[in-house]
Image (cartoon, grey):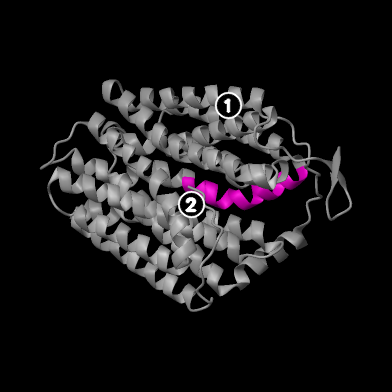
Amino acid sequence: MTSTLGRGTDLPDPVEAGTGDYRRISLALFLAGVATFGLLYDTQAVLPQLGADLALSPTQASLSVSVATGALALAVLPLATLSEAVGRRRTMLLALGVAAVVGVLLPLAPSFGTLLGMRAVQGVALAGLPATAMAYLGEEMSARALGGAMGLYIAGNSIGGMTGRLVSGLVADVSTWRVGLAANAAVAVVCTVAIVVLLPASRRFRPQPLRLRPLLGGVGAALADPALRWMYAVAALLMGTFVGVYNYLGFRLTDEPFDVAPALVALLFLAYAVGSLTAPLAGRMTVRLGRPAVLAGWIVVTLLGVLLMLVAALPAVLVGLVLMTGGFFAAHATASGWVAARAQGRARAQASGLYLCAYYAGSSVGGWAVGVPFTDHGWTALTVVVLGFLVLALACVGAAARLVRPRPVRDWAGAP
């Protein structure tokens, strides 16, 4: 049986929930999320060890994270566009394969410069996953099945971001940072092999010629809406805050007055789990309160968490970290959902791509930049900078809210 889409092309019926293909696709893309975000952020958990071994300042060591996320930000739109011509599955498998191979070779880097070059290659490769995976699901899944499959993919992103840091950090504590990165790369290789076996070929994808004018038209439309531009700024500011705090918190806690063991510092990334609670909660709240109010409220929660982490007592730091993490994930889910709902027609894919560009650019630039005041003046100086980011984010939300009529909403989407 076939379905006829608006363009008059006969295509197979989409995949329904509960079928074998649904289970295979959902599991494959869950594993893709685990592998992608495990590889992208695995050096974050070993920054203190990496810095000590290679005689680097905290700001220099953090470049191992910023280079990868910056390369991803630059490459996400081109690779998403390339997948329109060469195919979603092929793009995803090639991206994961290259990133996993680089991950295996990364612990062998003879110098920090070489390591940064390899991380840049890895970031470019990983850019082939986020937008392409969502497009694959949107094409292959029925409307009823899409929500569950997308939820599993997003869960894989969150779990990958958490487990990548945990594996590399815990293994590095009993060996070296190089062995920690190798252990995480082994997890990514296993995931990649499983994805090759599980992920069905695209049935509903039809290749499109690579044409520059439609792409530029979509990007132009996504940039023309001032409300969307404010949301791109929110993405960059939130991610700069989030990655900046996590980049340098390990340096603070392994130093006086805390003197926390590196293995225990790695366990801080378990705080990511709170995001799986706050992001869905934010979605339900938007139904009653609307996106502007919900987004502003969760940014305030993030800000309160950052303030609480100023207290030089480990329990206060941990509670503050949980508040900041939960607030970030809820705010990010709300902002990305606002973009998806606001963008129209052909601009929708480009708007999501631009949001991801801003998101990872914020990770790269902001996550590195807040290290300068931290290195020179300590945690209080870092806090002042990230509080400035969050106040600016609140101002952006206010500016966007004035451009749209506030109203309750009944749909939302997020990408961790």
Mark 1 and mark 2 in contact? Answer it, CB < 8 Å.
no
The residue tagged 1 is 192
Distance between the Cα atoms at labels 1 and 2?
Answer: 23 Å
The magenta span reads 69-85
Give the position of the N terminus as an image quadrant: top right
The location of residue 44, given as percent across then percent down, is 36, 39
Residue type at mark 1?
Thr
The location of residue 399, given as percent across then percent down, is 45, 76
The location of residue 356, given as percent across then percent down, is 54, 54
Magenta stretch: includes residue 137: no
Closer to the observer: label 1 or label 2?
1
Decide if residue 68 is on the left or right side of residue 277.
Answer: right
Q: Badge 1 local density, few (<14 within 10 Å), some, or many (20+)?
A: many
Viewer-closest of 400 and 256: 400
Q: From what the image shows, is residue 251 above or below residue 171?
A: below
Residue type at mark 2?
Tyr
